[in-house]
């Protein structure tokens, strides 16, 4: 191998560094209108009447929409089709869109929004888990889960029970959401800051009453996502409908405050964890119960609920496991798929709980973890297939590199060192749609002069997946990555890909790109035998014309057959161990993290520098969630901190030293042995 593991520059780095990268909000078209949304001032209220006559009469206004114009319900998951683009009969959170306007400029659109007269009948909201539990019959439960795995437990010699609460928080991507719609000759094109172009195409077609072949979705450069740009949003649908109504391009770009109200971030979660152990430190049984604050709509909520319980058995061998959960409806912005969706909260609870058990049993916390690790080539109690695993090596390396045993309980007052483990999937084995389509496809085209073009529907949201795909293809073909032209995230031009979520792109799109490259290489070798691809490519085209090859990837089927078994299975799992050195000023309560030592089982690093960047980003996000970030609301339902000034997050000044160790377990199914690094490294940071 010549490219795998090298520190190659990102293929889009020059365009982004020089300002040439075009984001959704940068786009402009002739005669383009500006869109704005009127949002609810109430957390819960009936809509008695809407009068838009004054707004429609305002000079410069091209069109106005209300809920009756967009009555079709949709949702991110097939099981929760509960949203409309604009509220129809009732608003369910402050900030829910009620009406939409397209006008000649932002100022006119804002004036038109102010002229819309809405009569509301306020209702009593539920704004917390406890309130929602008290009013289940009125407000509702979105999902109930009760699962039990394994044989009857052996008698436990030691038991412990803990109650944990994890506050919600949001993604805080630098780029605000934006969408621009064009309607030409009966076809709709939407340029959107989305992580899932193909899924958005499906939802958009349904919402505005078109067939999918008449809808094109393109994701330009994206300035961060972290799950916050997975869902179909009101501004996407309204931009499309307004473009169809006016025949002119329509662009919505949200303000930072609006992004806070779109949310779809981390669920607040109340968790009860009980475990039984032998005196020697073997885990006997586990009962995990949780109540999730889901906000007003489904989003990824069902998946997040099941993920609260799915991945604990991938790190620790649990002979008997009970998982019970409820996702509750509240009158707040919907929660959804923030980085690690549904797994950071229970990982925090489990790792802190294990530390407490270790103290009670008088066993070193790392030794206790090592006694109970799940090994490679095993099946967990909830029927998840673990293939490669470098978890034990991660623990050993992180413990040694951090000096954990030299420092644990031996540092001066106010200083301490923590340790935690984590695991995550390299793409979900079950897709977000129901069907037999592949999870990822890639097409390679060989044109005149031997020019290679790779088409893939995956979206690069800043994580560097474009660089990974070109590196994988170039490695197979034996050419330089810069010799490959890459086209991504365009539903008209690129083959199917599910999008950027669940840490799936390197594993799934990477495998599709590798297969496409292998097929193209074989095709060229058949036409021009005996020569390297670089020399043979142009000659093959002269002899046969343009050549194409298609690669695809579908993961192995899941093992489980119980309700909810679709959440958790993956073709491979990454594993992490993290140590954090923390200082606390006992007089002021000020907490400072001085160093984080991190070991991550990456399978194989396609690009080492990119992998390290993902881990450093996960440390930044994890420390923010642990120390300061929170999505909290006033009793009126309004956001307490809807700006970058008020919402506290970690700045570069608070970032500690981060020491990274990559463990390469060489997964047999990954492209060149690679596994995920997008979301997994977040999980152990918070409990450590």
Image (cartoon, helix red, strand yellow):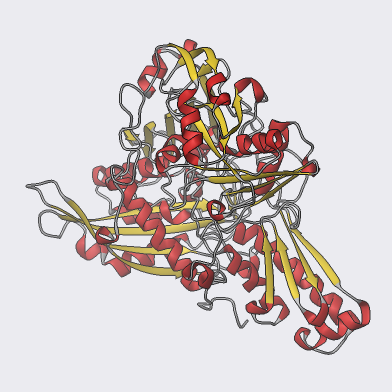
For this orientation, the residue located farthest to the left is 587
At x 58%, y 49%, the residue is 195
Picture quadrant of residue 661 = bottom left
Q: Is residue 106 above or below residue 599?
A: above
Is residue 669 at least partly visible in the picture? no
- On the picture, is 520 further left or further right than 647? right
- On the picture, is 530 further left or further right than 553? right
Picture coordinates of residue 33, whole percent (x, y): 59, 42
Is residue 590 at least partly visible in the picture? yes
At x 65%, y 44%, the residue is 249
Instruction: Give the total number of marks visible in the rendering.
Output: 0
Image quarter hosting the N terminus: bottom right
Q: Nearer the viewer, residue 540 or 262?
A: 262
Q: Is residue 679 above or below residue 39?
A: below
At x 41%, y 20%, the residue is 42
Picture coordinates of residue 650, whole percent (x, y): 30, 53
Q: Is residue 163 above or below residue 220?
A: above
Picture quadrant of residue 163 = top left
Picture coordinates of residue 615, whole percent (x, y): 42, 62
Picture coordinates of residue 653, whole percent (x, y): 25, 61
């Amino acid at each position: 191998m010549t490219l795998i593991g090298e520190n190659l520059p990102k293929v889009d780095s020059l365009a982004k560094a020089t300002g040439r990268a075009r984001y959704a909000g940068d786009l402009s078209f002739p005669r383009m209108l500006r869109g704005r949304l009127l949002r609810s001032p109430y957390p819960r209220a009936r809509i008695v009447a809407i009068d838009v006559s004054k707004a429609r009469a305002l000079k410069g206004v091209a069109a106005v929409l209300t809920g009756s114009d967009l009555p079709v319900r949709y949702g991110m998951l097939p099981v929760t089709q509960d949203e409309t683009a604009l509220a129809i009969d009732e608003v369910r959170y402050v900030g829910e869109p009620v009406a939409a306007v397209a006008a000649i400029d932002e100022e006119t659109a804002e004036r038109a929004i102010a002229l819309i007269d809405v009569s509301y009948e306020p209702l009593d909201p539920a704004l917390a888990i406890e309130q929602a539990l008290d009013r289940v019959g009125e407000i509702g439960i979105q999902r109930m889960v009760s699962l039990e795995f394994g044989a009857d437990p052996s008698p436990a010699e030691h038991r412990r029970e803990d109650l944990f609460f994890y506050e919600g928080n949001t993604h805080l991507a630098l780029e605000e959401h934006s969408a621009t719609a064009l309607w030409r000759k009966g076809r709709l094109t939407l340029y959107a800051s989305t992580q899932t172009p193909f899924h958005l195409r499906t939802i958009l077609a349904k919402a505005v009453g078109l067939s999918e072949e008449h809808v094109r979705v393109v994701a330009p450069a994206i300035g961060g996502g972290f799950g916050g740009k997975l869902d179909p949003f009101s501004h996407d649908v309204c931009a499309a409908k307004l473009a169809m109504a006016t025949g002119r391009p329509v662009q919505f770009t949200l303000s930072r405050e609006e992004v806070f109200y779109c949310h779809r971030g981390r669920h607040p979660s109340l968790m009860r964890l009980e475990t039984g152990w032998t005196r020697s430190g073997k885990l006997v049984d586990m009962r995990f119960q949780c109540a999730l604050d889901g906000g007003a709509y489904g989003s990824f909520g069902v998946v997040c609920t099941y993920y609260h319980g799915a991945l604990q058995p991938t790190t620790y061998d649990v002979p008997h496991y009970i998982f019970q959960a409820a996702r509750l409806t509240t009158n707040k912005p919907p929660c959804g798929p923030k980085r690690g969706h549904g797994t950071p909260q229970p990982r925090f609870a489990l790792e802190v709980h294990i530390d407490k058990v270790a103290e009670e049993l008088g066993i070193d916390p790392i030794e206790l973890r090592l006694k109970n690790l799940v090994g490679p080539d095993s099946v967990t109690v909830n029927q998840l297939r673990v293939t490669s695993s470098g978890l034990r090596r991660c623990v050993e390396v992180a413990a040694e590199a951090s000096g954990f045993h030299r420092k644990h309980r031996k540092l001066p007052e106010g200083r301490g060192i923590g340790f935690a483990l984590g695991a995550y999937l390299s793409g979900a084995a079950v897709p977000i749609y129901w069907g037999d389509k592949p999870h990822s496809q890639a097409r390679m085209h060989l044109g005149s002069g031997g020019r290679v073009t790779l088409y893939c529907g995956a979206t690069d949201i800043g994580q560097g997946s474009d660089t990974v795909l070109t590196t994988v293809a170039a490695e197979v073909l034996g050419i330089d990555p810069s010799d490959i032209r890459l086209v991504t995230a365009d539903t008209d031009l690129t083959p199917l890909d599910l999008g950027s979520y669940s840490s799936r792109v390197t594993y799934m799109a990477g495998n599709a790109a590798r297969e496409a490259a292998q097929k193209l290489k074989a095709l060229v070798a058949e036409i021009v035998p005996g020569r390297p691809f670089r020399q043979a490519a142009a000659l093959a085209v002269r002899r046969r014309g343009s050549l194409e090859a298609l690669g695809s990837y579908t993961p192995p089927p899941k093992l489980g057959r119980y309700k909810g078994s679709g959440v958790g299975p993956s073709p491979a799992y990454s594993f992490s161990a993290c140590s954090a050195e923390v200082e606390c000023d006992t007089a002021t309560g000020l907490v400072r993290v001085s160093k984080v030592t991190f070991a991550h089982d990456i399978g194989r690093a396609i690009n080492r520098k990119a992998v390290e960047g993902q881990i450093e980003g996960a440390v930044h996000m994890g420390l923010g969630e642990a120390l300061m970030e929170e999505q909290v609301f006033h009793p009126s339902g309004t956001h307490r901190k809807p700006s970058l000034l008020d919402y506290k997050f970690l700045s570069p000044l608070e970032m500690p030293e981060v020491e990274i160790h990559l463990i390469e377990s060489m997964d047999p199914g990954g492209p060149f042995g690679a596994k995920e690094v997008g979301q997994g490294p977040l999980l152990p940071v918070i409990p450590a």
